[in-house]
Amino acid sequence: MAELLRAEGLVKRFDHFVAVNGVSLSFDAGVLTSIIGPNGAGKTTLINLLSGNLPCDAGRILFQGEEITHLPPHERVGKGISRSFQITTIFPQMTVFQNVQLPVLARLGRAGHPFARPDLDPEVRAEVEMLLREIGLEEIKGVRAGNLSHGDQRLLEIGMAIASRPRLCFLDEPCSGMNPAERGQVQDLIRRLAREWEVTFVIVEHDMDVVFTLSDHIIVMHQGAILTQGKPEEIREHAGVREIYLGEEIGT
Ligand SMILES: Nc1ncnc2c1ncn2[C@@H]1O[C@H](COP(=O)(O)OP(=O)(O)O)[C@@H](O)[C@H]1O
Ligand SMILES: [Mg+2]
């Protein structure tokens, strides 16, 4: 399996608090990895380091063999790495179409022309409409994003994250606050994109049903470090994992 991303000895401190404490890991192409662990384990901080939203205090990151440790987020997007955020980050005043159009314009190199009418550009339009069909929001493309249901907002975010056509895509709690039907929809979308678009997803998720259904590989974080990692069935049986969740049921 081809290695997409490798991180070695990543460290992130906030003042004297060490949020990520020497994490080394790798993600292989086509392997869906979930990062789990209790609140405060450092999952979001780790994603921020890998996506370039936070600088590392130590360690290095290689993507397809090339060092990207100090690249800003937009340059990592250009190399094929994208992400969605734990807190919804759509533009609520803009329509669904306009939200998806933003990353499409960036990808096609058409951003930065504020007086142009990008929605009239046939290539941009076709790409945005294809993405809207993919995430199932084409019927409501004219609706302001702020008026969408929570579930549809999260679908929109996934659409925006994949608009850059990433090889590797981090999703931070894509199913948070969703009802079971919405969770099912997101899981189907992630599976389809992984298969048809060959996107390698790394997801942070609290819902253990989602984690155990989707994952090929699971990394367990605790207090800024990797406690263990392995196949879902190995993690389910791991005594230490049960312990850090203090009796919470893990996917049973
Ligand atoms: N910007 C920040 N400033 C200070 N502390 C932070 C910051 N971001 C995260 N932390 C702390 O780092 C720890 C890990 O946070 P986070 O990565 O968000 O955990 P998780 O996503 O696993 O719940 C937490 O204790 C959190 O309070
Ligand atoms: Mg988090």
Image (spheres, grey):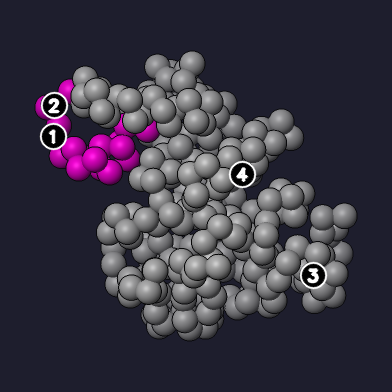
Q: Are marks 2 and 1 in contact (CB under 8 Å)?
A: yes
Checking the image for residue 234, the label placed there is 3
Q: Are marks 4 and 2 in contact (CB under 8 Å)?
A: no
Q: Dot 2: few (<14), some (14–19), or many (≥20) neighbours within 10 Å?
A: few
Name the residue beneath numbered marker 4.
Answer: 191
Alpha carbon separation for disc pair 1 and 4: 35 Å
Closest to the camera, between mark 2 and mark 3, is 3
Q: Disc 4 marks which amino acid? A: Arg
Residue drawn 53% across the image and 35% down it: 155
Residue 189 in view of the camera: yes
Q: Cβ of disc 3 within 8 Å of ligand 1?
A: no
Residue drawn 56% across the image and 45% down it: 195
Q: Dot 4: few (<14), some (14–19), or many (≥20) neighbours within 10 Å?
A: some
Alpha carbon separation for disc pair 2 and 1: 6 Å
Q: Earlier in the sequence, mark 1 or mark 4?
A: 1
Residue 135 counted in the magenta span: no
Q: Disc 2 marks which amino acid? A: Ala
Q: Earlier in the sequence, mark 4 or mark 2?
A: 2
Kindly indicate the quadrant of the structure image that contains residue 219.
Answer: bottom right
The residue positioned farthest toward the front in the image shown: 1
Q: Earlier in the sequence, mark 3 or mark 4?
A: 4
Q: The C terminus appears in which quarter of the rendering?
A: bottom right
Alpha carbon separation for disc pair 2 and 3: 54 Å
Q: Dot 3: few (<14), some (14–19), or many (≥20) neighbours within 10 Å?
A: few
Alpha carbon separation for disc pair 4 and 2: 36 Å
| Span of residues in magenta | 99-117
**Element class at badge 2:** loop
Q: Cβ of disc 2 within 8 Å of ligand 1?
A: no
